[in-house]
Structure formats: structure tokens, C-alpha cells
Image: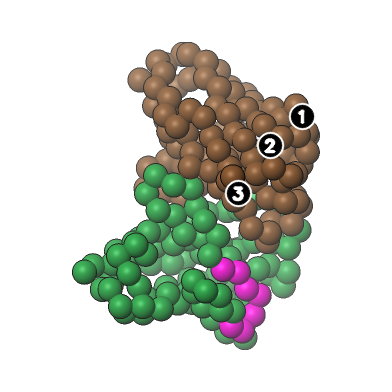
Amino acid sequence: LAKTTQPISMDSYEGQEVNITCSHNNIATNDYITWYQQFPSQGPRFIIQGYKTKVTNEVASLFIPADRKSSTLSLPRVSLSDTAVYYCLVVKAAGNKLTFGGGTRVLVKP
Amino acid sequence: GAGVSQTPSNKVTEKGKYVELRCDPISGHTALYWYRQSLGQGPEFLIYFQGTGAADDSGLPNDRFFAVRPEGSVSTLKIQRTERGDSAVYLCASSPQGGVSYNEQFFGPGTRLTVL
């Protein structure tokens, strides 16, 4: 399974856009890119998933270049409640488990 | 609707004791997963059930760990002869179907296990 690399931590301020880039150089043809969010004392929560180009939902946008060796999660106009750990995962189309790395700790300051 | 629930929320036990952790998945979800999360790390896969059967138990660390899902709904993770290194948050997740990991998994709040 493709290994992912993402920043350990990032600081931001309320109202700013946060972009977290994840590297997955060994991604396979049938792999998807998925992002989960985890608040303290809670289980992870699915945010967004994509295969290529751009995906947008009510929470975030996911940008995936043509070579798919990296992806960028974009959180528009963050608030204090967006402080969390964000995990980038590469998942197989036909698989049965999620493989988490260390994630990126995002701290949103007032 | 009701999400994934886990009981107890906290469990403190002594080294060498036996513990059971329970997971109630979202109604109708056929796939159920157990993960373990140590402080400061991402969750680590333990076992996956499709219905009543364990389809993948490759993440169980050793034979002290066992899980069941007898009726295809509630699951119990059992740990024998607990060790201090077993201390972690044990997370349960479910999804509508298994074998397709790009499907969203819905996580419970976890059980924090502390082995003294």
C-alpha cells in the first residue's frame, strides 16, 4: 500500500484557508485518496475522497494533480472548531481496512 | 440516526486481567472494523468482520486478542492476560458493505483502556 507523507503540524488563524499537502509517490492505479478528521476524544470522521482532479463538498476541497503522486486538502475559512488531526490515506478500491499515518495536527488560533 | 456506540467509554484494569470491549455498529451495516490508537499516533487496524465472520484478522497483535460478532451486529473485542502495552484507545467502525475500503467508515468514540 502506498505510504503517505504529510506535515506533522500546521498553525492557522480563524477565517484563513488551510491547505495540507500529502505525498503518496507509490500510489497504484486503483487506489483512492481519502481524508479523515479526528477531534480529541472522538473517532475519525470521513471528510472527502477523490481519484483525480478536484473534488469539493460542503466541508473541503481535494486537489489531485494528473500524476496523482500528491494531493492537497483545502479547508476554506477555518474556525476554531476546525482544530483537529487530519489524516491522508490511500485506500484500495477493493480493500477492507484503512491504514493511517501520523496525520497533521492543525491548530486554528483566534 | 444513531451512530456507532462503544462501551465502556473507559476501562481501567490490572496487568494480567481479562477485558471485553463492546461495539454496537450502525444498524444495517454489514462490515465492522476494530482499530487501536496509541497516544499521538493514527489508528492501527486490528480486525475486520463481514457479517458474522472475521474476514481479515491480520492486525491482531497476538493470540491474547480475539474478537467475535456472533449475530452479525454487535461485536466484542476480548483481551486476555492484559499487559501495560495494551493501553490505548480501541476504536470500532462500521460501513454499509465490506470489501470496498473506499467506502466511508463510521467510527465510534472509542474505549480508552488503561492497564495498570
The mark lying in front, picked from 3 and 1, is: 3
Looking at the rendered structure, whether the residues under marks 1 and 2 are on a common chain is answered as: yes
**Chain to which mark 1 belongs:** B
The CA span between labels 3 and 2 is 29 Å
Judging by colour alone, the chain drawn in brown in this rendered image is: B
Label 3 CA crowd tier, 10 Å (few <14, some 14–19, many 20+): few
Please provide percent x and percent y for residue A61: 51, 78
* Colour seen for chain A: green
Looking at the rendered structure, whether the residues under marks 3 and 2 are on a common chain is answered as: yes
Please provide percent x and percent y for residue A2: 60, 63
**Residue A89 counted in the magenta span:** no
Three-letter residue code for mark 1:
Glu
The residue wearing badge 3 is B1
Q: Is residue B82 above or below residue A5?
A: above
Please provide percent x and percent y for residue A27: 63, 70
Label 2 CA crowd tier, 10 Å (few <14, some 14–19, many 20+): some
Sequence-wise, the earlier of marks 3 and 2 is 3
The mark lying in front, picked from 1 and 2, is: 1
The mark lying in front, picked from 3 and 2, is: 3
Three-letter residue code for mark 2:
Asp
| Relative to B65, A83 lies left or right | left
Secondary structure of residue under mark 2: loop
User: Which quadrant of the figure has residue B104?
Assistant: bottom right
User: Which quadrant of the figure has residue A74?
Assistant: bottom left
| Relative to A42, B47 lies left or right | right
| Relative to B73, B59 lies left or right | left
Nearest the viewer among B102 and A47 is A47
Sequence-wise, the earlier of marks 1 and 2 is 2
The CA span between labels 3 and 1 is 21 Å
